[in-house]
Image (cartoon, rainbow, N blue to C red):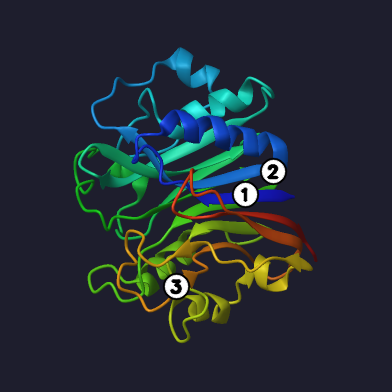
Amino acid sequence: MRVMTWNIHSMVDGHTAHQLRELAALVKETRPDIVALQEVNQEIGAPLAGEALLAACGAADVPSKVPLREGNFALRLCGLLREGDGAWRFAWTAAHRGYERLEEGVALLTRQGIEDVLALPLTEDTPIPRQAAQPGQGMADWRRRVALLVRTGGVWVGSVHCGWWRDELAPFAAQWARLEAGLPGTGPLLLLGDFNNPDAVRGEGYDLLRDRGWQDAWACAGERDEGWTARAGIDGWRGTALTRMRLDLVLGRPGLTCSRCVTLRRDDLSDHAGVLADVTFGA
């Protein structure tokens, strides 16, 4: 299975059309089976996406505090991909409001079909299906985090955008505990995304997830590059002593193997690099 993950920082810097066009071209060139995206945005107040548009763009029904709107980055990207391959489908759920004008969330796109969908709160105890009945509550808190999982090709795959280890109000360890408590209990499972915990820092989030048995595709890859995915100075990491950080990971349950894991570094697309990995699951 070939997977891609990218904190795409969409619709922030005024070059959305370029992002969409170039990311679609990269997906078509590299041919991943699954694409996990974070910071997947839509404009607050944009018209709601109608049923015909949702169907044309391959949208799956997902619990969320907010509905999909016209212009949603994942919806438009999947629409572009379906122009060349109608099998592509996508799922999106909202996390919080950002930059005063956007509703930010996480997304998964797959050309293997969507068999099931699961949305998990990482900073709240109320299940997301119940939260969906209270659409206005909590979205203003930028700390609010969610994970989105789909089952595709018999494998559960999640798109995750976590918070920071030292956040006093929403620490990473508590988010990780909620995530693990809500995951499907058995079988192959991948978690892809921006974990906001550099692998070079000892005794914090990266060590926690490795201690919990999660395998890092880059760490066990037969072929890999330097691996770093973000520089100091990006949002959330101003003032850090680290100059380069590996924040974006492909994680799997025990039995994961990886033949190749490389970064896709495109400053014209995002302040993060993407990650592309070829993975398999053993017994």
Q: Measuring 67% from the left and 73% from the top, which residue is drawn there?
A: 219
Residue highlighted by disc 1:
4
Q: Looking at the image, is mark 2 or mark 3 earlier in the sequence?
A: 2
SS state under label 1: strand
Q: Measuring 47% from the left and 13% from the top, which residue is drawn there?
A: 52
Q: Measuring from the top left, give residue 69's x and y in whole percent.
A: 35, 26
Q: Real-space Cα distance between discs 2 and 3?
A: 29 Å
Residue highlighted by disc 2:
32
Examine the rendering and report whether any part of residue 42 can be seen. Answer: yes
Examine the rendering and report whether any part of residue 58 can be seen. Answer: no
SS state under label 3: loop
The amino acid pointed to by label 2 is Pro
Q: Which sits in the foreground, 225 or 60?
A: 225
Q: Where is the C terminus found, in terms of image quarters?
A: bottom right
Q: Measuring from the top left, give residue 268's x and y in whole percent.
A: 48, 44
Q: Looking at the image, is mark 1 or mark 3 earlier in the sequence?
A: 1
Residue highlighted by disc 3:
243
Q: Measuring 45% from the left and 38% from the top, which residue is drawn there?
A: 92
Tag 1 near tag 2, CB within 8 Å: yes
Q: Residues within 10 Å of mark 3 (few under 14, many from 20)?
A: few
Left or right: where 110 falls relative to 175: right
The amino acid pointed to by label 1 is Met
SS state under label 2: loop
Q: Real-space Cα distance between discs 1 and 3?
A: 24 Å
| 1 vs 3, front mark | 3
Q: Measuring 56% from the left and 35% from the top, which residue is drawn there?
A: 22
Q: Measuring from the top left, give residue 169's x and y in whole percent.
A: 23, 69
| 2 vs 3, front mark | 3
Q: Residues within 10 Å of mark 1 (few under 14, many from 20)?
A: many
